[in-house]
Amino acid sequence: MHVSHLSLADFRSYARAEVPLDPGVTAFVGPNGQGKTNLVEAIGYLATLGSHRVSSDAPLVRMGADRAVVRAAVVQGERRQLVELELNPGRANRARINRSSQVRPRDVLGIVRTVLFAPEDLALVKGDPGERRKFLDELVTARSPRMAGVRSDYERVLKQRNTLLKSAAMARRHGGRSMDLSTLDVWDQHLARAGAELLAQRLDLIATLLPLADKAYEQLAPGGGPLGLAYKCSAGESVDSGAARTREALYEVLLAALGEVRKQEIERGVTLVGPHRDDVLLRLGELPAKGYASHGESWSYALALRLASYELLRSEGGEPVLILDDVFAELDARRRERLAELVAPGEQVLVTAAVDDDVPGVLVGARFGVSGGEVTRL
Ligand SMILES: Nc1ncnc2c1ncn2[C@@H]1O[C@H](COP(=O)(O)OP(=O)(O)OP(=O)(O)O)[C@@H](O)[C@H]1O
Ligand SMILES: [Mg+2]
């Protein structure tokens, strides 16, 4: 698929922007702080309902405005669709498809598909477990948009269960009446059910992604690997080994693990087991990448994960838009050329760079200058 037109209203630094786009490579070039990333961030938002830079919507709305609109015309083979999201920080966002009446924002998932690689991705390797969980869950949702519903069910159940645990912890501390634990049993089952579904998808994703990531790393940095991805499950080792993979089996594992930590949970007032506490251990050769890999190796690792995501999505459901935000400046000349050759044949590749020279020669295509809030075709 590709995006044939992007319209913004009060998104980030843009009061308005209209950007016609073609398939193939498009580069946005301009000095720092002019709004290049803002453009590709908007396209990424349509694909994930989130920004790769911030966790809330408020910074995405232009200072002084109270809502932002991102709209894209999307071409998938013969099919044309118009998707629109209205961001209303503090209130519910709204969505429309083909100008029709309102749909839920999550209904637009799957229309715009992107893989976005940006400097922030270094956190995939060096950052907290939450960064890796976000990576997995966004990709799980891109593979299967109905997982957006499972994820929000899980979040809701987790929140309610934590509230219950917190009041149980309070009651204990203040010598109050002990809680009726049968209520907690019901929440355990809800949590284990949504959790098992998410866990099954994450495990399947990791198994599918590893060979692709390994291959991408080898192409970028020959002889530097191999890569290893090991899922660290808060519910115990039995899940890491890969023995139990079906949803039913994972449900039982989660339920049993919740049973084991219940006493601690009631003492501490939080849910200690479940996908929200898991992590992925990234290995480079014999060593963990986090804490050991060099800056350049970490950067290539993160890039390999994104290129693997791109291969995976294109093999499963048509080509996503590949977005490379400011990545070439960070790479040495050889890795830059290799990356450019790998991505050049993509259906649509959007690149941002501060200077023209940072865009490798093989990436021929449209160029836009971005400066002072204007996006002009060069
Ligand atoms: N909500 C907002 N309202 C108004 N301006 C904003 C908002 N959010 C960001 N900006 C402005 O947008 C600019 C940053 O744009 P962007 O990140 O797209 O720059 P860039 O061209 O990618 O720069 P670089 O080359 O440094 O990556 C900043 O000047 C920032 O102040
Ligand atoms: Mg930028």
Image (cartoon, rainbow, N blue to C red):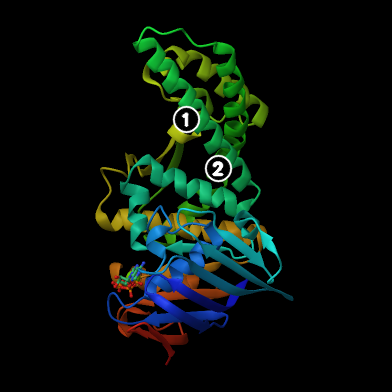
User: Horizontal and vertical percent for residue 16?
Assistant: 46, 80
Specify the amino acid type for callout 2: Ala
Q: Is 197 left, or right, of 257 in this rendering?
A: right
Q: Which residue lies furthest to the bottom in this view?
A: 378
Residue 287, above or below 55: above
Is residue 274 visible from the viewing direction of this image?
yes
Q: Which residue is drawn at 54% across and 58% down?
A: 93
What residue does disc 2 label? 207
> What label does residue 233 carry, if any?
1
Query: Residue 355 sits in which quadrant?
Result: bottom left
In the depicted view, which residue is nearer to us: 321 or 296?
A: 321
Name the element at disc 1.
loop
Residue 51, above or below 79: above
Q: Which residue lies furthest to the right in this view?
A: 78
Q: Is 43 left, or right, of 127 in this rendering?
A: right
Q: Residue at x 60, y 31 (%)?
A: 196
User: Horizontal and vertical percent for residue 177?
Assistant: 45, 7
Image quadrant in which the C terminus is located:
bottom left
